[in-house]
Amino acid sequence: MRLLASCVDSGSLKEILCNVGTDTSKKAEIQPLSIRTSLSEGLKASIDTLCLCDRYRILLGRNNGTLEMVKIVDVPHTEEEGTQLPTFQVSEFEVLDSISGMLDDSKLAPLYEGSKKRVKLTDGFVTISQLPGLKDSYLVATRSGLISVVKWDAKESKLTKIETFEVKAPLEFAQLYDLGQDNSSGDFVLAYGGEENSVKLVQLKRDYSSLVQVWEAKNVKNDKLDLRVPIWPVALRFLRPLESTDVEKSKLNYQFVVITRWSHLGLYRTQHGRKPLQYKELLPNREPLTQLQLVGKDVSELGNIFATDFKDFEIVTADTKHNVYKFDIKGKLQLKFGKTDITGASSFLAVHDQKYLLQGGLDRYARIFDLQSGTRLAKVYTGSKVNYLLMLDDDQVGIDKPKVTKDKKRKPEPEDEEEQEAQNDELWHHLDKSKQNSVKKARK
Amino acid sequence: MAVEELKIKNKQKRQQLFAELKHQHNKERHTMRRARAKEEREDTEAKSKRLAENVPKTIESMREYDETVTQGIEGDEDDLMQYFNNKNEPPKILLTTNVNAKKKAYEFANVLIEILPNVTFIKRKFGYKLKEIVDICNRRGFTDLVIINEDKKKVTGLTFMHLPEGPSFYFKISSYVEVQKIVGHGRPTSHIPELILNNFQTRLGKTVGRLFQSIFPKNPDFEGRQVITLHNQRDYIFFRRHRYVFRNEEKVGLQELGPQFTLKLKRLQRGIKEETEWEHRPEMDKEKKKFYL
């Protein structure tokens, strides 16, 4: 398994090569074959998010506002003397081109002053994703509400910013819709939202000439104490449009799932109206939830699901303590990942191939879970808080050593009856003898 | 040999037998020790050799493997910068209590005022949220916010928040011994003390060590001869304060200044009480040989 982990503390990218069963916290378990640090730029320039362009290129956004196109080069692993590792390839990274100044902190200052929870908010990249149907065009969204389109020119090895649009800040996510029949034509649709910034659907023209808002969600009714329900969507995933006989063609037809920081699971259908179909609290006391990943049969590259109704798929989400939950779409808890193992909040979750769940967080471990059963497949200490994880492949390297089992403490009893009896006799004899010796003399 | 290994069905007999066996073993051991001591009185080398060979197993020495102990801190300089954000200025601490605190909290605050350098105590008022307090502190250039937590007329906890961006630590306080209770205690002076951080080994432990490092100024007044020790043992952090004196070239005298208390890390959060980085869970206590600091 080849993992790329964005490490916050050193602002670096780490390539981890490990097999199933790896656990760095136990000495007797399998250890990772290699952990290599590259592109280290320090805490202030940590990698917020990255996007895999193809097998040999990644686009990454750093916390200091730099966008970098990085080439991955496979080189054979050079073995240290004395170690007997199987032969494998490791990656080396080379920055091809970069754009800086993509962030704007000044926009966020008035926002966090108004925020009830946040003390300080710094700008960062929230999403970098490939525009559906186009090969080398990327959508880059920042927390301060700057949505840009960036193009990569492979011939000249140049990254250029084509257009930047400004939307209402702060942003927690910008999710592109990639479930259309034909992704190669028509406008791009994306959804965004954030703290006190309800979900909005916008259309981006294919020639990047304009970004128009087409739909905005409306808050739900006040709660039973007649208090306003706060808005803070943190993640969104699209479904296929509704397929039914009573679809009104004049109305927009989109469906999506939203997770909010106030632990709501919102199911939206634009045909139904601006309010959600269902808005359910997943945790008591509105404890914060931070992530959303869909688990189902047919999930697109951007994490959206090819389903036309809110059924037959599950969601994976994480809270700010240490839990990673799998809920069904009705809001019933199915499974908790890494129940006793994870000690810090998960800052990153991703589903790879509908097979693995990648988890990384503040406890400085990168973990891989089996998505269905929830068993842990690998656990690797990265030495730094993990911001982003990417699985490049899930191949096993070499043959694993057999596990060393601890020998039991107590020796097994002799099965042979005669032997046992002999032992008993010996004991009695020993005691009788000692008794004779230790008889105290009566005092005179 | 354990008592259940004797295959005797009569419990009384079995116990009696086992007691006898044990007694006998003890006797043998005592005679062996007497003989050994006699031998070693004449041959001192044998004793040192034996002691070097037979190191007793303690929970600490049998500590469960932790990969973070051997590895260095990644991005060490940046990590330090986070804590020492005001390069040359000494730390400036705001001390307060929980809302509606009782007498004990104020008494403890008096003690902490003596210990912490450059500290301002503010009586906690109603109606200010933590975020507002932090904002106020930031505007006035405070580097740390310390909150005493009192519950049912007992000081139970201590929250340290590094400003402006965190992290936040919550410690449980126990075994508090006030200065007057310590026999032969001295009076502290206003000199900046030296700091001894003992046995903070894991990555989490190092973070906790950093916190205390950042709270006390880096330029101790050596003429004060005062030392604050934070000794970590089995995840409990023992706070002690002493004055030392060099009696002669070999002997050092210690005078305790007090107070004594014990801290136990319960929670470490990113930012000002945002995402949890580490939290103590009751089931962690089940593993006796696993330590987190």
Image: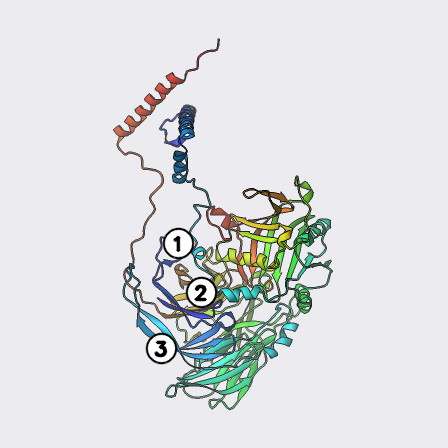
- Chain containing mark 2: A
**Chain containing the residue with disc 3:** A
Extreme residue toward the front, this view: B249
The N terminus of chain A lies in which quarter of the figure? bottom left
Q: Tell me if I can see residue A241 in this picture.
A: no
Q: Residues within 10 Å of mark 1 (few under 14, many from 20)?
A: some
Asked which secondary structure carries label 1, the reply is: loop
Q: Residue A263 in the image: x percent, y percent?
A: 56, 66
Vertically, is B187 above or below A19? above
Sequence-earlier tag: 1 or 2: 1
Residue furthest toward the top? A444
According to the image, label 2 marks what residue? Answer: A359
Q: Which mark is residue A274?
A: none
Picture residue at 38% right of the left edge, 34% below the top: B46
Q: Tell me which corner region of the image, top left, top right, bottom left or bottom right, holds residue B138.
A: bottom right
Q: Position of residue A141 (x, y in %)?
A: 51, 79
Q: According to the image, label 3 marks what residue?
A: A56
Helix, strand or loop at mark 3:
loop
Disc 3 vs disc 2: Cβ atoms closer than 8 Å? no
Residue B234 percent across, percent down from the top left = 51, 47
- The reply to the same-chain question for discs 3 and 2 is yes
Who comes first in sequence, dot 3 or dot 2? Answer: 3
At which x and y percent is residue A370? 39, 62
Estimate the spatial distance between the alpha carbons at disc 3 and disc 2, rounded to whole Å.
23 Å
Question: Callout 3: few (<14), some (14-19), or many (20+) C-alpha neighbours within 10 Å?
Answer: some
Closer to the eye: label 1 or 2: 1
Q: Nearer the viewer, residue B267 or A281?
A: B267
Q: Residues within 10 Å of mark 2 (few under 14, many from 20)?
A: many
Q: Determine which quarter of the picture holds residue B93.
A: bottom right
Q: Which residue is mark 1?
A: A26
For label 2, the SS is strand
